[in-house]
Image (cartoon, rainbow, N blue to C red):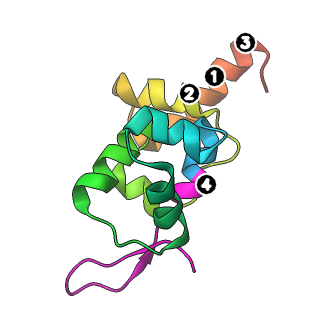
Amino acid sequence: MTARYKLPGAPEAKVYLQEWRETKFDTQQALSNATGLPTPTISRYETGQREWGKGYLEALAYVVGCRVQDLFNPPPKALDSALRSTLLCYGVDESNLNQVIAIINTFSNRS
């Protein structure tokens, strides 16, 4: 099974919780420790065996460092998630995010 979410009147959508979790936490247990959700619950969310609630999506997005709508797309693999989260927290517009990261990488020799 795959993690899916369905809004009333909308098509079902895949939720990429496992992929987003792996950008910040190595294990489901680590995410469990950060959220207070039991590890089996996180496992059921990741495999689609448990239905999503809006509050859970909001809490999990916050802890993994993305927005709720980001959970419906795989995380950008080329971006460092800590840097991405920090820039978003400081109000960098998502449309400028790649350009800002490229500039930072240029000055920090990370590219």
Labelled pair 3, 1 in contact (Cβ < 8 Å): no
Work out how far the residue at label 3 is from the one at label 1, CA to CA, in angstroms.
9 Å
Q: What residue does disc 3 label?
A: 108
At label 1, counting other C-alpha atoms closer than 10 Å, the crowd grade (few under 14, some 14-19, many 20 or more) is: few
Measured as percent of width and height from the top left, residue 60 is found at 39, 47
Query: Helix, strand, or loop for circle 3?
Result: helix
28 and 110: which is toward the camera: 28
At 33% from the left and 27% from the top, the residue drawn is 91
Identify whether 83 is placed above or below 36: above
By secondary structure, the bulk of the magenta-drawn segment is best described as loop
| Magenta residues (range) | 1-19
Give me the C-alpha separation between circle 1 and circle 2: 16 Å
Residue under the image location 56 percent in, 36 percent down:
30
In the rendering, at what x and y percent does residue 110 appear?
Answer: 77, 21
Mark 2 highlights which residue?
Answer: 82
Q: Earlier in the sequence, mark 3 or mark 4?
A: 4
Mark 2 surroundings: few (<14), some (14-19) or many (≥20) residues within 10 A: few
Where is residue 76 shown, x and y percent of the image? 62, 49
Between residue 30 and residue 81, name the one nearer to us: 30
Q: What is the three-letter code of the residue carrying label 4?
A: Glu
Which residue type does callout 1 highlight? Ile
